[in-house]
Image (cartoon, helix red, strand yellow):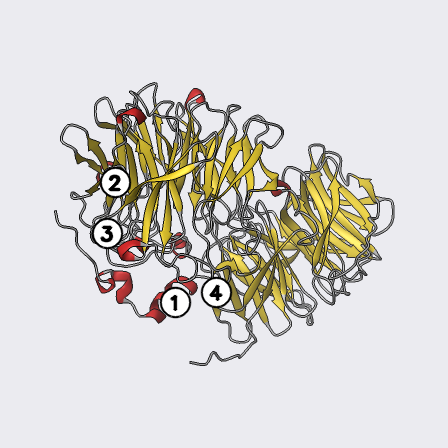
């Protein structure tokens, strides 16, 4: 087993979730210390310091975007899957998300709040210069809604974002500093936006079909195919993207859904009219088909390629009296770091993520830094467990590392 | 730093009772009645109308309970739906060529007439009513009737709206510059008068059709009237009370029994209109604009209001009370949030069918809470 270190967000003691972790354009690891279960809080941007082996707090979001946490509105509480590094100029783009309640409340409904004075001001797009460690500028990406996920088309100077709750796809022109609504997709947010070689943006719809925005056609199109799922007890509904990572050769993408019994799926988006879809099978354990497992327990995320060209991801394992009566560790659930050979599909467990005080089965995102080590973001169970949350570092053996292992860089959150 | 293990009671959300937490989640949606969002297809046997061609912008019903609809978007489709007996499906009747917007549908004399707009202007499309006598549970058979393009009422002018009169023999419509008439099933369209009007128009049970005169802020507002069978057109026929009529696109509904009309102004006030008289405002929706309205036989008006994420409302005509019924969601058939609606008709059994004006649109069947029903503690 590879050594694992836990780095809590000590500078944000109330942070209850880390929904986003990404490598920056220069190869360092950035993470969002989010706080959504308490009123009047904000997200803080953290970065792993290789020298001190600690997390540095770079800024508090409410302060840099002039939306104070005590405004009485829903707060700028998190950065969801919305880091997007721009390698050419060293800028890390990021967009904020909603759900944190106003300071005097304990819950925020973005639907009910839409018409209210406490409505979320809107997702803020932040341009953070990693060369100078300064916020260059920020804009409201779209009013009233949060940003679920973000992808950058660096060649064209565009960012694409998905709104929450209305599930609209937006494009933001970095040169013009303006956003444009491309239309609604569905009700269940995809948790990732992908970009193909033809500059098309890919997402998913509620029924598990691939959705694609083609700038040349200026249309949101829906695939005739449904992504793979367990046909024994599922219908394809809710089989939307959770996490996705491009293979190092850039020709295919590995992805898992935001649903229970997740399958690893490989996509070749540039082949044929609607790409090619390969089902690599389930990545978590068997379970009863008669109970709808919460996907805070049955989960797979943190997909990232190491410097060795192997796919790493974190899949949960939990105690089940019928299907897995010896698993789950001290807390009944645990996060397993898997390494998978992308050419053969062979896989093995290389680490177990453990916190001394709680389970660590839910990892949102993973990344490899410029030195070749792995980092994973932890989300607490229902965000109610042990605070602060933080990130895991998994140190890979020297033979699995390489310089600039983060390249080619991941362009979506 | 030593991590802190948090008992649930330390999380503010969990200091609420289960009842309070439930109210703050479920109570934010459809606080009375139930929605069924139905996809524009026969589920399990066909795919819905294409995502960005499906926004439902026109609806009409027939006496036998069929529902017809027209869509807007990249292309315009017509569809038929049945939700009673052994039905339960939506049939795509096809694409209307060179059209991207359906602004009105009317049913009469065995036909449906669609008013569509495209790059060259507005046109009328005629087709026979759709045969839907099939068991959609087990075995079905459909023929698709051909359509006839009746051409443009006024060259190059988009159609704003149209309605059938109470007899179902005539269609009265409005382009950007003219009022027109069409004998349903015939081949010709007749221009009645030059007219600049706005928004939707409505028919009463006496054979008249009404619309809003365009006025500036300093002019008294009024309705024009057209008697469909004779073509008699009267400007400024019905004075309107004080209201937000300038730049207004009124929404109308008609009581299914009395024929009393109701219309809205730009501020979301609702007015009754009967016996050639528009009364003062009955109520005002909490968020403008008012998007849809449908009156039920038991004396209630249901509709949507508000931009972005709309809300459902009900106006009880007997008490004058208007209630905000919260945000719109369907948990039956399709699980979906409803954000924008543009049309509403009354269903066979008093349920209301709303047309969703959005990508991936559904027909939303609303089954109101039974009037005077008491929720037991």
Q: Residues within 10 Å of mark 3 (few under 14, many from 20)?
A: many
Which residue in the protein does label 3 denote? Answer: A40
Q: Which residue is nearer to you in this view: B10 or A306?
A: A306
Q: Which of marks 2 and 4 is in front?
A: 2
The answer to whether residue A101 is visible is no
* Residue B372, horizontal then vertical, whole percent: 53, 79
Real-space Cα distance between discs 2 and 3? 27 Å
Query: Are circles 2 and 4 on residues that touch, CB within 8 Å?
Result: no
Which residue in the protein does label 4 denote? Answer: B325
Q: Residues within 10 Å of mark 1 (few under 14, many from 20)?
A: few
Report the disc number at residue A392. 2
**Could you say whether the residue bearing mark 2 is in a helix, strand or loop?**
strand
Disc 1 is attached to a residue of which chain? B
Real-space Cα distance between discs 1 and 4? 13 Å
* Residue A254, horizontal then vertical, whole percent: 46, 34
Disc 2 is attached to a residue of which chain? A
**Could you say whether the residue bearing mark 4 is in a helix, strand or loop?**
strand
Real-space Cα distance between discs 3 and 1? 22 Å
Residue visible at 42% across and 65% down?
Answer: B27
The answer to whether residue A364 is visible is yes
Marks 2/4 same chain: no
* Quadrant of image for the N terminus of chain A: top left
Which residue in the protein does label 1 denote? Answer: B23
Q: Which residue is nearer to you in this view: B74 or B196?
A: B74
Real-space Cα distance between discs 2 and 4? 46 Å
Question: Is A236 situated above or below A47?
Answer: below
Q: Which residue lies furthest to the top in this view?
A: A88
* Quadrant of image for the C terminus of chain A: top left
């Amino acid at each position: 087993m590879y050594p694992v270190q836990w780095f809590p967000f000590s500078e944000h003691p109330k942070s209850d979730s880390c929904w986003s972790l990404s490598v920056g354009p220069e190869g360092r690891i950035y993470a969002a210390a989010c706080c959504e279960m308490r009123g009047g809080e904000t997200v803080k941007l953290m970065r792993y310091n290789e020298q001190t082996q600690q997390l540095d707090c770079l800024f508090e979001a409410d302060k840099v975007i002039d939306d104070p946490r005590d405004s009485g509105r829903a707060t700028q509480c998190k950065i969801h899957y919305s880091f997007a590094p721009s390698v050419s100029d060293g800028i890390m783009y990021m967009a904020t998300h909603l759900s944190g309640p106003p300071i005097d409340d304990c819950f925020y409904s973005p639907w009910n709040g839409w018409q209210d004075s406490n409505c979320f001001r809107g997702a803020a797009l932040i341009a953070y210069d990693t060369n100078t460690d300064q916020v260059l500028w920020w804009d409201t990406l779209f009013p009233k809604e949060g940003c679920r996920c973000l992808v950058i088309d660096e060649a064209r100077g565009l960012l694409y974002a998905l709104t929450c709750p209305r599930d609209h796809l937006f494009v933001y022109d970095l040169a013009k500093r303006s956003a444009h609504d491309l239309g609604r997709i569905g009700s269940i947010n995809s948790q990732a936006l992908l970009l193909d070689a033809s500059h098309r943006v890919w997402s998913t719809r509620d029924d598990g079909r691939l959705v694609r925005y083609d700038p040349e056609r200026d249309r949101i199109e829906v695939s005739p195919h449904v992504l793979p799922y367990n046909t024994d007890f599922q219908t394809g509904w809710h089989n939307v993207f959770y996490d996705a990572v491009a293979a190092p050769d850039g020709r295919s993408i590995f992805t898992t859904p935001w649903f229970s019994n997740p399958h690893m799926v490989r996509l070749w988006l540039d082949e044929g009219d609607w790409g090619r879809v390969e089902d690599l099978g389930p990545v978590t354990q068997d379970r009863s088909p008669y109970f709808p497992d919460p996907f805070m327990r049955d989960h797979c995320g943190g997909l990232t390629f190491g410097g060795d060209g192997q796919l790493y991801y974190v899949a949960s394992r939990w105690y089940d009296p019928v299907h897995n009566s010896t698993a789950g560790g001290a807390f009944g659930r645990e996060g397993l770091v898997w390494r998978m050979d992308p050419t053969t599909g062979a896989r093995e467990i290389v680490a177990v993520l453990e916190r001394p005080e709680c389970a660590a089965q839910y990892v949102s995102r993973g990344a490899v830094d410029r030195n070749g080590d792995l980092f994973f973001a932890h989300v607490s169970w229902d965000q109610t467990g042990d605070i602060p949350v933080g990130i895991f570092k998994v140190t890979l053996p020297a033979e699995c590392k390489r310089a600039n292992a983060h390249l080619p860089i991941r362009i979506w959150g | 730093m030593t991590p802190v293990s948090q008992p649930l009671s330390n999380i503010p959300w969990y200091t609420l009772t289960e009842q309070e937490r439930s109210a703050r989640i479920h109570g934010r949606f459809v606080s009375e009645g139930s929605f069924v969002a139905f996809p524009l297809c026969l589920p399990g046997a066909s795919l819905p109308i294409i995502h960005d061609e499906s926004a439902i912008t026109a609806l009409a019903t027939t006496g036998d309970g069929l529902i017809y609809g027209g869509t807007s978007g990249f292309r315009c489709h017509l569809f038929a739906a049945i939700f009673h007996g052994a039905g339960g499906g939506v049939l795509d009747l096809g694409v209307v060529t060179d059209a991207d917007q359906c602004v009105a549908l009317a049913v009469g004399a065995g036909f449906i007439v669609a008013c569509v707009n495209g790059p060259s202007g507005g046109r009328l499309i005629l087709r026979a009513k759709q045969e839907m006598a099939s068991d959609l549970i087990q075995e079905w058979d459909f023929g698709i009737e051909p359509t006839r393009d009746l051409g443009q009422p006024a060259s190059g002018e988009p159609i704003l709206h149209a309605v059938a009169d109470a007899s179902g023999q005539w269609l009265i419509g409005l382009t950007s510059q003219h009022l027109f008439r069409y004998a349903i099933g015939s081949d010709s369209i007749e221009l009645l008068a030059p007219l600049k009007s706005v928004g939707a128009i409505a028919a009463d049970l006496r054979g008249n059709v009404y619309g809003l005169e365009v006025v500036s802020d300093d002019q008294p507002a009024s309705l024009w009237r057209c008697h469909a069978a004779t073509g008699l057109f009267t400007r400024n026929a019905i004075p309107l009370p004080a209201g937000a009529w300038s730049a207004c696109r009124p929404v109308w509904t008609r009581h299914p029994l009395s024929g009393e009309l109701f219309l809205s102004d730009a501020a979301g006030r609702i007015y009754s209109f009967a016996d050639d008289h528009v009364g003062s405002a009955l109520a005002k929706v909490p968020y403008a604009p008012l998007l849809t309205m449908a009156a039920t036989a038991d004396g209630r008006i249901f509709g949507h209001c508000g931009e972005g994420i709309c809300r459902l409302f009900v106006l009880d005509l007997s008490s004058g009370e208007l209630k905000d019924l919260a945000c719109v969601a369907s948990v039956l058939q399709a699980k979906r949030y409803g954000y924008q609606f543009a049309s509403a008709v009354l269903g066979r059994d008093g349920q209301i069918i709303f047309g969703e004006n959005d990508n991936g649109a559904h027909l939303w069947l609303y089954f109101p809470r039974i009037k005077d029903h008491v929720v037991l503690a």
